Image (cartoon, helix red, strand yellow):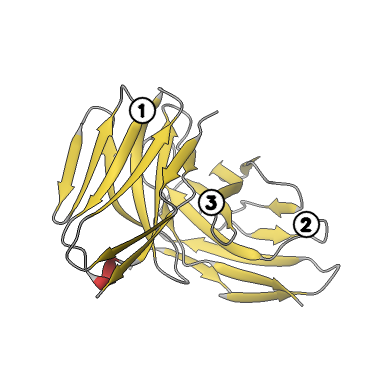
Amino acid sequence: GENVEQHPSTLSVQEGDSAVIKCTYSDSASNYFPWYKQELGKGPQLIIDIRSNVGEKKDQRIAVTLNKTAKHFSLHITETQPEDSAVYFCAATIQYNFNKFYFGSGTKLNVKP
Amino acid sequence: DGGITQSPKYLFRKEGQNVTLSCEQNLNHDAMYWYRQDPGQGLRLIYYSQIVNDFQKGDIAEGYSVSREKKESFPLTVTSAQKNPTAFYLCASSPGAVSNQPQHFGDGTRLSIL
């Protein structure tokens, strides 16, 4: 089955700096890659997603890139703010596998004011 | 507002006791899921349901049971057979039959052993 690895497990940046979180996946049939943000005591919230027919997607300060050949995708947060501090999860779904998601182990991002 | 409601937010279980976690959605989604989250770990799939009256085991189904009698409800029972039930439990839903749609999550139930 699919295996998603996420790095780093923790990331500390200064406010205003950029943060990058990377994920790799094993099954080339995966074709949808969402990113979730989880604040303490809350459920994960979708922040951005990308499909395999696209190489990059941006939404204000957040962007995701996908390299299908290398089977990795990354989350980029620019101009980080203290409210960006949370745990971020990547995920992948295998095509026609009924929306079964495979999640990375999470990255705890700490933005220092 | 449409969303997923999990209750209770906190739950305590005594040894040998079964407890049931509630999950209700008003998004008209066909598919629903239960995940377990342990500290510092990712989400592990317990059970999922594609449609009413049908459900499948996920990766860690032992010691858990579910039912799907209504489209909007997918309760999870943590049985006494689950020897290490302390965790954060998340319920999710998605449109279902159409693949590649995001899952939407509730705010979780934290289960602890007394």
Q: Which residue is mark 1?
A: A71
Who's the residue at 51% across and 31% down the image?
Answer: A2
Residue A5: x %, y % from top left: 46, 40
Q: How far, Cα to Cα, is label 3 from label 1?
A: 21 Å
Q: B91 or A9: which is nearer to us?
A: A9
Q: Position of residue A21 (x, y in %)?
A: 33, 48
Where residue B74 sits, quadrant-wise, is: bottom right
Q: Amino acid at mark 3?
A: Leu
Q: In this rendering, is residue B20 above or below B99?
A: below
Q: State whether residue A70 is above or below residue B93.
A: above
Residue depth check, mark 2 versus mark 1: number of the one nearer the observer: 1
Q: Nearer the viewer, mark 3 or mark 1?
A: 1
Residue bearing mark 3: B43
Image quadrant containing the C terminus of chain B: bottom right
Query: For mark 1, does the 10 Å Cα neighbourhood hold few (<14), some (14 to 19), or many (20 or more) residues?
Result: some
User: In the rendered structure, which disc, 2 or 3, sits on the residue that comes first in sequence?
Assistant: 3
Task: Give the SS element for disc 3.
Answer: strand
Task: Name the residue at the left extreme.
Answer: A60
Residue at which label 2 appears: B82
Camera-side residue: A110 or A25? A110
Q: Nearer the viewer, residue A46 or B77?
A: A46
Q: Chain of mark 2?
A: B
Q: Residue at x 72, y 52 (%)?
A: B65
User: Which residue occupies 16% across, 46% down?
Assistant: A58
Residue A94 is drawn in which quadrant?
A: top left
Task: Give the secondary structure at mark 2.
Answer: loop
Chain letter, disc 1 residue = A
Q: Amino acid at mark 1?
A: Lys
Position of B80 with respect to A7 (left or right) is right
Chain of the residue displaying label 3? B
